[in-house]
Structures are given as structure tokens and as C-alpha cells.
């Protein structure tokens, strides 16, 4: 038994596990059946989406694998950048502390020279 509801391209993409752009390209290439609503928006029958997904299962899975790899790479980059950011914050804090100590020594030296 199939569900004959209509989906927007975004909802179809979510159900298919791919991007909206891929759905739109499939519609443009006539690989995926879709009709325009009275509001001039694309509507895709869930049955047609299922047929398209079955025909493109390998491609959809490889896209999903690529997305997972991109997510992993992004997570690694974010983690590395967060660590780098913390190191830079610590370095800035250390430099400010050094600056304050040097300023204090300089002020003491000036007062010693003036009032001996």
C-alpha cells in the first residue's frame, strides 16, 4: 500500500536523505515526476519519490556517505579550531599578565628615581 500524499521538494529531500538541489535537478531532468500547484509550487507524489529513490538508491547512499564524511571532517576542523582558539586566548592572557608586571616594575622604577 502506498501513500499518495504530495510533498514539497524540501520534504522530499528530507525523506530521500539528500539535498533539495538534487530533488530540483531530478525534476528538471524529468527523472522525478512533479507537478506545479495552483500557487506555482512544485508538488511531488510520495509514490513518485519512492520510485525515484528506488531507481537511485546507490547514488543516494553514496551522497549520504559523502555527507557523513563531510560532517566528520567538519567536526574535526571545529574541534581543532576550538583548541587553537583556547590556546590563543591563553597566550593573550599570559601576554597581558606579563605586560602588567612590566608596567608595575617600570612605575616602581620611575618613583624610585624621582623620590629615591
Image (cartoon, rainbow, N blue to C red):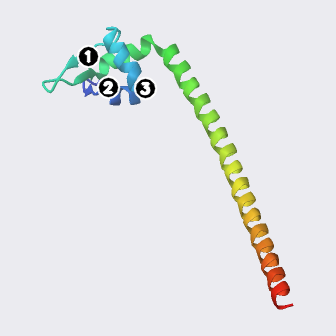
Counting residues from the start of the chain, the first of labels 1 and 3 encountered is 3
Q: Are marks 1 and 3 in contact (CB under 8 Å)?
A: no
Which image quarter is the C terminus in?
bottom right
Which residue is painted at 72% across and 64% down in the image?
93
Left of 86 or right of it: where is 108? right
The one nearer the camera, 3 or 15, is 15
The tally of labels here is 3
The extreme top residue here reads 30
**How far across and down, in percent of the image, does residue 94 sit?**
76, 64
* Label 2 packing within 10 angstroms: few (<14), some (14-19), many (20+): many
* Label 1 packing within 10 angstroms: few (<14), some (14-19), many (20+): many
Q: Which residue is mark 2?
A: 9
Q: Which residue is mark 1?
A: 34
Counting residues from the start of the chain, the first of labels 2 and 3 encountered is 2
The extreme bottom residue here reads 115
Circle 1: element type = loop
The one nearer the camera, 116 or 7, is 116
**Can residue 46 be seen at all in this image of the molecule?**
yes
Tell me the quarter of the picture where residue 31 sits: top left
Q: Are marks 2 and 1 in contact (CB under 8 Å)?
A: yes
Q: Which residue is mark 3?
A: 19
Left of 74 or right of it: where is 2? left
Q: How far separated are the C-alphas under marks 2 and 1?
A: 9 Å
Tell me the quarter of the picture where residue 15 sits: top left
Q: How far separated are the C-alphas under marks 1 and 3?
A: 16 Å
Which residue is painted at 84% across and 80% down in the image?
109
Circle 3: element type = loop
Left of 113 or right of it: where is 41? left
**How far across and down, in percent of the image, does residue 13 sit?**
39, 26
* Label 3 packing within 10 angstroms: few (<14), some (14-19), many (20+): some
Counting residues from the start of the chain, the first of labels 2 and 1 encountered is 2
Amino acid at each position: 500500500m502506498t501513500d499518495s500524499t504530495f510533498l514539497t521538494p524540501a520534504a522530499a529531500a528530507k525523506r530521500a536523505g539528500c539535498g533539495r538541489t538534487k530533488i530540483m535537478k531530478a525534476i528538471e531532468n524529468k527523472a522525478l515526476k512533479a507537478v506545479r500547484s495552483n500557487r506555482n509550487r512544485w508538488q511531488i507524489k510520495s509514490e513518485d519519490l519512492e520510485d525515484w529513490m528506488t531507481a537511485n538508491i546507490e547514488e543516494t547512499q553514496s551522497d549520504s556517505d559523502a555527507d557523513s564524511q563531510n560532517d566528520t571532517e567538519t567536526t574535526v576542523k571545529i574541534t581543532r579550531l576550538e583548541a587553537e582558539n583556547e590556546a590563543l586566548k591563553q597566550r593573550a592572557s599570559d601576554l597581558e599578565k606579563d605586560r602588567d608586571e612590566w608596567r608595575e616594575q617600570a612605575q616602581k622604577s620611575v618613583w624610585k628615581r624621582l623620590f629615591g
